[in-house]
Image: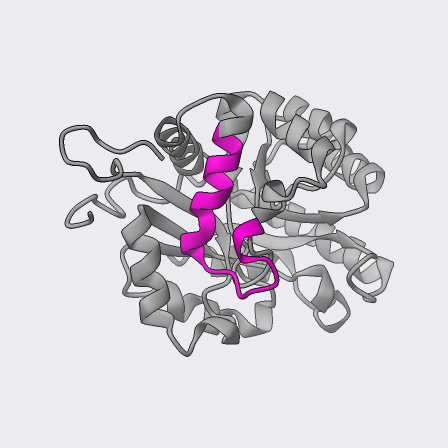
Amino acid sequence: MNSDERTGTAPLLRLADSHCHLDFPELQNDYDAVLARARAVGIRHFLTIGVSVRDFPRVLARAEGTQDIFCSVGTHPHWADQETDVTADELVAITAHPKVVGIGEVGLDTFFTEASWDAQMRNLLVHIDAARRTQLPLIVHSVKQDDAMATVLRRAHATGAFPVVMHCFSGGRALARANLEMGHYLSFSGLLTYEDRPDLREIAAELPADRILIETDAPSLAPAPHADQRNEPAYIVHTLEVLARLRNVRPQALAEQTTANFLRAFGKIPASAAPITGVS
């Protein structure tokens, strides 16, 4: 990043990690240091994501009492078979908590998970119902299921609109186009930093500026400079820099844009949630 000509320091960024897992065990041994490093690079908002409704109290614990951390509630496709009893009513009730700003992550994945298709689809539809009722963003996990996901979202959208964030977008142009037509947001992770993803890079370069988010998915999906290492929120700057280069904009401008997008997408987060003070 360019340095500030007056101070010789990197310009102050305002970043949002739109998808991380701060409750995961990989981040616990040095948790305070992880947050300190993230805040030092400019992260002002963290969204720590629920993957199991039954384990949601652990996720909420990371958000409660911390001004800049918010959370979501949902059942990841990996846990779909274990949580077929989750109801939309239950999800809606949990969202009454002021720290809960999204529904998910939930979705379709037969590449990384062995959970049954029926359970994944059932849970996705339940979460869609909750997102429609609350108008909180549905945080979608979609891996190599572009056609099925586009079909489900289009059919559901036709019966009543609801906000959507496509987490760690890795799909093709058709899925990207379908989501844009429905007014959804697409979030990019460290996958974008790998040169063997030219199709993904082309999509990221061409999307409307007001539809883009960035994330780490920490502790997974470390960006290229940290390949095969534990990921952490501070590494979001690598994704920011690659995305800025692809879109031919300054990293600081892209940080402002993606953070504004994040706060628009997750409108339940108060504007005063993370004042920019005391960070260099």
Q: How many marks?
A: 0
Looking at the image, which residue is at 31% across and 46% down? Answer: 42
**Residue 201 vs residue 109, the one in the foreground:** 201
Main SS type for the magenta part?
Answer: helix
- Way the structure is coloured: one colour
Tell me if residue 136 can be seen. yes
Tell me if residue 100 can be seen. no
Residue 131 is inside the magenta segment: no
**Residue 215 vs residue 8, the one in the foreground:** 8
State the image coordinates of residue 94 (x, y, percent, origin top left): 48, 61
**83 with respect to 211 (left or right):** right
Residue 82, quarter of the rendered image:
bottom right
What residue span does the magenta drawing correspond to?
223-244
Residue 234 is inside the magenta segment: yes
Relative height, residue 92 to residue 29 (above, below): above
Relative height, residue 146 to residue 100 (above, below): above
State the image coordinates of residue 87 (x, y, percent, origin top left): 65, 61
**202 with respect to 247 (left or right):** right
Q: Quadrant of the N terminus?
A: top left
Relative height, residue 73 to residue 145 (above, below): below
